[in-house]
Amino acid sequence: MIYIELPFNQIRQITFYLAMEEFVARKLDLDECFFMWQVEPTVLFGRNQLIENEVNLDYCRKHNIKAFRRKSGGGCVYADMSNVMFSYITKDENVSLTFNRYLNMVTKTLQKLGVEAEASGRNDILIHGKKVSGTAFYHVPGRSIVHGTMLYDTNMQHMVGSITPTDAKLVSKGVQSVRQHIALLKDHTNISLPHFKAFVRQELCNDKHVLSPDDVLAIEEIEKEYLTPEFIYGNNPRYTAIRKQRIENVGEFEVRIEMNKNIVKQVNIMGDFFLTGDIDNRLLSVLKNIPYTEEAIRQALPQRVDDIIMNLSKEDFIKLII
């Protein structure tokens, strides 16, 4: 099998590696390919999932965790630099055979390290009955792509918090519950993560193909689709986010933000604060039809908002909204 190598070492965001899979599948005439990648904290949800049903967007924003959609089906997963992702591309279009081949070769690799791993069900790898790896699959013309997680280690708090309610008790219970059902590879082998990656490559691949700078540019073109609001948020219906907070010396606030595909459509602000200016024209109207990001909101707002709502600073208002 051929290992696909990039001409640089820097870490890219998850959309680049998803696009890289597509590039390899669509543009390279190779029978079997494999590569590994790692990303900063990111939630990756499946092709047919609604983001607001699967991803705790508030938690992700608070902890700088990105969220993106993939083209394969399946559920929502969390990834960070403490684990590693595998990508396998093959000319075989038979779903069952492709899954089985991938699961078996990864399982056997773990077993060679002395790990008591086994393939289970449709797409999981277990250690002593606990999940250490999950996989997902999709087709492009003439190729099959399988990508999977490998939980060497991870931030359990972020894994749970990014896809569950932010209530501290629920997150705490969630960590305990999830920890009972997943395995971390570091607990079952003394090998470090860098050495594990080297071992996997040595075991699975006997050749390499180094991508060119032009290939990277082509991957970045493919990546653009993954970065569009239309792809990330899909055909999600409008929904309303509600923010409640008391700001000292200002008052109680309840902000309702109606959104579609992460674009603000309507903002309504209620509370016991004192108005000192035109809230409709100077505050609410400027927030319509802009991306729901801190940068876009900051640029849309006037320099001062305390002459609209008494004692309210612009920074406190941005924190309230986001």
Image (cartoon, rainbow, N blue to C red):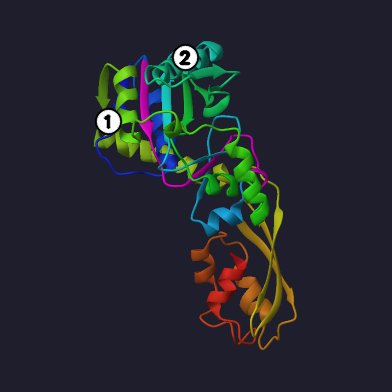
Relative to 203, residue 155 above or below:
below
Which one is closest to the eye, mark 2 or mark 1?
Answer: 2
Relative to 166, residue 181 above or below:
above
Report the magenta residues as a range. 32-54
Q: Distance from label 2 to label 1 (Cα)?
A: 27 Å
Residue 284, picture quadrant: bottom right
Q: Quadrant of the C terminus?
A: bottom right
Residue to which mark 2 is pinned: 104
Q: As rendered, which of 268 and 97 lies closer to the eye?
A: 97
Badge 2 local density, few (<14 within 10 Å), some, or many (20+)?
some
Residue plotted at (55% across, 12% down): 96
Question: Which amino acid, mark 2?
Answer: Asn
Relative to 119, residue 40 above or below:
below
Instruction: Tell me if I can see residue 142 in this picture.
Output: no
Place of residue 54 in the rendered image (x, y in percent of width and height, measured from the top left): 64, 43
Place of residue 158 in the rendered image (x, y in percent of width and height, measured from the top left): 53, 48
Residue 76, picture quadrant: top right
Instruction: Tell me if I can see residue 182 in this picture.
Output: yes
Badge 1 local density, few (<14 within 10 Å), some, or many (20+)?
some
Question: Which amino acid, mark 1?
Answer: Leu
From the viewer's perspective, is 191 left or right of 285? left
Q: As rendered, which of 28 and 187 lies closer to the eye?
A: 187
From the viewer's perspective, is 287 left or right of 14? right
Disc 2 and disc 1 in contact, CB within 8 angstroms: no
Residue 44 in the magenta stretch? The answer is yes
Q: Quadrant of the N terminus?
A: top left
Residue to which mark 1 is pinned: 211
Place of residue 48 in the rendered image (x, y in percent of width and height, measured from the top left): 63, 34
Residue plotted at (25% across, 37% down): 213
Residue 306, picture quadrant: bottom right
Q: State the SS at label 2.
A: helix
